[in-house]
Amino acid sequence: MSTFDVIVIGEGVAGLTAAGQLAAAGLQVATFEQQIFGGLVLNVNELDPAPAGGEAGGAAFAAELIQSNGDAGVTSIQEPVTAVATNASGFQVTTDSGNYQARQVIVASGARLKNLNVAGESEFEGRGVSKCADCDGPMFQNESVVVVGGGDSALQEAQVLTQYCGKVHLVHRGNAFSAKAHFIKHITHNDKIEVHFGTTVEAILGGQMVERVSLNTASGTTELACAGVFAYIGLEPNQDFLDAAIARDANGFITTQDNLETSCPGLWAIGAVRSGCGGTLADAMTEAQQVATTLKQRLQ
Ligand SMILES: Cc1cc2nc3c(=O)[nH]c(=O)nc-3n(C[C@H](O)[C@H](O)[C@H](O)COP(=O)(O)OP(=O)(O)OC[C@H]3O[C@@H](n4cnc5c(N)ncnc54)[C@H](O)[C@@H]3O)c2cc1C
């Protein structure tokens, strides 16, 4: 069985940052990734805020991190982790192809965008329903699209979509945005964006492709013509592979002590999977640096 000082689960910015710092200090480190390195930032062409001193494009920034991790000697394993268990020497990390041993484990498995869970959403996925404004926006040249949500991501991505679309309907169930002031300012001054407060999407409708949505508003149900639907209504954590005994908050995000150790000693959680992580790249990287500093002291 392959043995490492530290196994990091997830090659998003949090996991890549922690792994790079630990390997640079001479520790044997492996990262595991279920899809492709980069995580959530892969789909963001223009990071705002952008990482200090790094690339403003998410994919380019992640590429910088993975490249420097390779140089530092991190072993990158492209397999989903399916279980983590404690044993006499620390932890056994399991994937479909085998078991790996580590003295300490960092959970940096991040989060995924929530679904609306309305009729038509899964049926029209890839046929008008998308979660990536930068990748799929160009397919909606001069069309009308609906963006759902009222936080930073919804407003940031609505703004991105106006580069391509004729009209962006921003549908938010609340009556005020929870996004940062500069995102609100941008969309308020953008003529292509029409805001629909107090409104929810009830169903996504169409034939071969999305043609319209059914909306629930204060004055009743109505339909709105659109070719695309992008939902940015929050995140849910990637944590199903962890034992149920590991403490989580009510929404499933992993809770930690101030030093970012979970309820299981030697198992750490950083970034978007952690309850209370700030939500930006910088927050995820700061947590990664904090745990890397602690583990360097413990393991060297
Ligand atoms: C639409 C959107 C726009 C954003 N824009 C910005 C911005 O402009 N600026 C900014 O600072 N922040 C932005 N953010 C926030 C930023 O993307 C996150 O804070 C950051 O990417 C979190 O990084 P992470 O490494 O914690 O998690 P993630 O990026 O989610 O990475 C986790 C990784 O772990 C992998 N993984 C999950 N489970 C397993 C498993 N079982 N086995 C192996 N691998 C696994 C995932 O595939 C993923 O690659 C944005 C977020 C969204 C959703």
Image: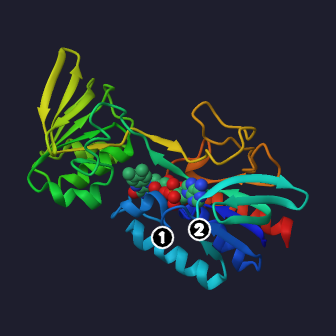
Please tell me whether residue 60 is drawn above or below residue 104 in the rendered image.
below
Kind of residue at badge 2: Leu
Compare marks 1 and 2 and give the one earlier in the sequence. 2
281 relative to 271 in the view: left or right: left
Q: Quadrant of the C terminus?
A: bottom right
Cβ–Cβ under 8 Å for marks 1 and 2: yes
Please tell me whether residue 208 is drawn above or below residue 30 in the rendered image.
above
The image position of residue 52, as x and y in percent, is: 49, 68
Residue visible at 85% across and 59% down in the picture? 90
Q: Nearer the viewer, residue 96 or 300?
A: 96
Check the image and name the residue furthest to the bottom.
71
Does label 2 point to a residue whose CB lies under 8 Å from ligand 1?
yes
Q: Is residue 62 visible?
A: yes
Residue visible at 59% across and 53% down in the picture? 271
Q: Nearer the viewer, residue 76 or 154?
A: 76
Picture disc at residue 16: 2
Kind of residue at badge 1: Ala
The image position of residue 283, as x and y in percent, is: 56, 54
51 relative to 86 in the view: left or right: left
